[in-house]
Amino acid sequence: MVEITANTVKELREKTGAGIMDCKAALSECNGDIEAAVDYLRKKGLAAASKKSGRVAAEGLIACSKTDKSGSLIELNSETDFVARNDKFQQLAKTLVGVAGEFNGDVEAMKVSKPNGFSKTVSEEIVEHIAVIGENINLRRIASISVEDGVVGSYVHNATAENLGKIGVLVALESSGDKEKLMNYGKFLAMHIAAAKPEALERSDLDPKSVEQERQIFIQQSIDSGNSPEIAQKMVEGRMRKFFEEVVLLEQTYMIDNKTKISDLMNQISSDVGASVKITKYVRFALGEGIDTSSVE
């Protein structure tokens, strides 16, 4: 029988990330052949991974990848925050966000694809990481934005490593103005979006049904307070104005100075960079938002 040395076990662990006892068992099963042991662990791990894939994953990381004129965000979930600090998990997040721009926000298309440089599909890559890391991992969503002439600003909040954190924001600024100044403004606007959580860029982007629902709620609240329906209809305009100031980016108050409306700030930025500046799109991902964790024990 081939002797299994500590160095051989260490080499197999470095290749696979599997536990010491699993590595010893694999090497014993494969007569000390490291490559065969890698395949053995992979096959064994894939069987275990299928059981883990049904467990709720609401932790993990938001990963950001950006050039001056484009950027991508992904949400890669794990079961625990501990795994989110794992080097292999973080490297997987960086690898996946690096190719996310090819899929125009279609996460399902990305999962079944084999991007350039990948030896297997994204889903297969994730399953192998589930086997090694020992927790369910899910690529939940992706998004990308770009500009024709301008910059894409970014910000990652609660960063655990470069471009990896709990909240990620991208904001597209179209302008022919000074790009260095634009990039600086883009970062601060992204920080504002991370904190202020706007639901839409402008009023017309809001769901009309949701807006009308808010209006009717305000009217009913006013009537319940003793106002007539006629007075309630007049009062609701002020309430709706405040509502828009809370949820529409261009109508929010800039959280960096707590006084300037974002639409007015854009005029100031335009003056400073020497050309008109327009926010054409933004994306904000917050880790775990909307995931039902009620089944987690």
Image (cartoon, rainbow, N blue to C red):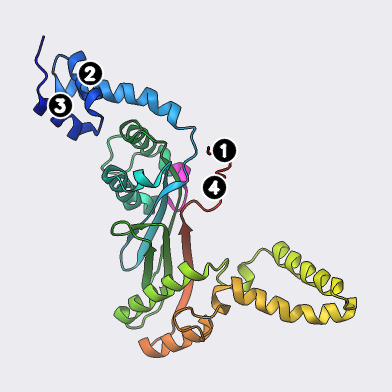
Tag 2: residue type?
Ala
The answer to whether 38 appears left or right of 178 in the picture is left
Q: How many C-alpha atoms fall within 10 Å of the one at disc 4: few (<14), some, or many (≥20)?
A: few
Q: Give the camera-side residue of 92 and 276.
A: 92
Instruction: Report helix, strand or loop for mark 4.
Output: loop
The answer to whether 136 appears left or right of 224 in the picture is left
Q: Which residue occupies 41% across, 39% down? A: 137
User: Which numbered mark, 2 or 4, is in the foreground of this view?
Assistant: 2
* Mark 3 or 4, nearer chain start: 3
Measuring from the top left, give residue 189's x and y in whole percent.
43, 75
- The residue where tag 4 is placed is 291
Q: Give the camera-side residue of 210 and 130.
A: 130
Q: Which residue occupies 18% across, 35% down? A: 14
User: What are the residue bounds of the magenta stretch?
Assistant: 103-109
Tag 4: residue type?
Ile
User: Which numbered mark, 4 or 1, is in the foreground of this view?
Assistant: 1
- Vertical order, 136 against 232 (above or below): above
Q: Can you say which quadrant of the picture contains the N terminus?
A: top left
Q: Which residue occupies 51% across, 86% down? A: 260
The answer to whether 90 appears left or right of 275 in the picture is left
- The residue where tag 3 is placed is 9
Instruction: Report helix, strand or loop for mark 1.
Output: loop
Q: Is residue 287 visible?
A: yes
* Mark 2 or 3, nearer chain start: 3
Q: Is residue 107 magenta?
A: yes
Q: How many C-alpha atoms fall within 10 Å of the one at disc 1: few (<14), some, or many (≥20)?
A: few
- The residue where tag 2 is placed is 25
- The residue where tag 1 is placed is 295
Instruction: Report helix, strand or loop for mark 2.
Output: helix
The answer to whether 119 appears left or right of 245 in the picture is left
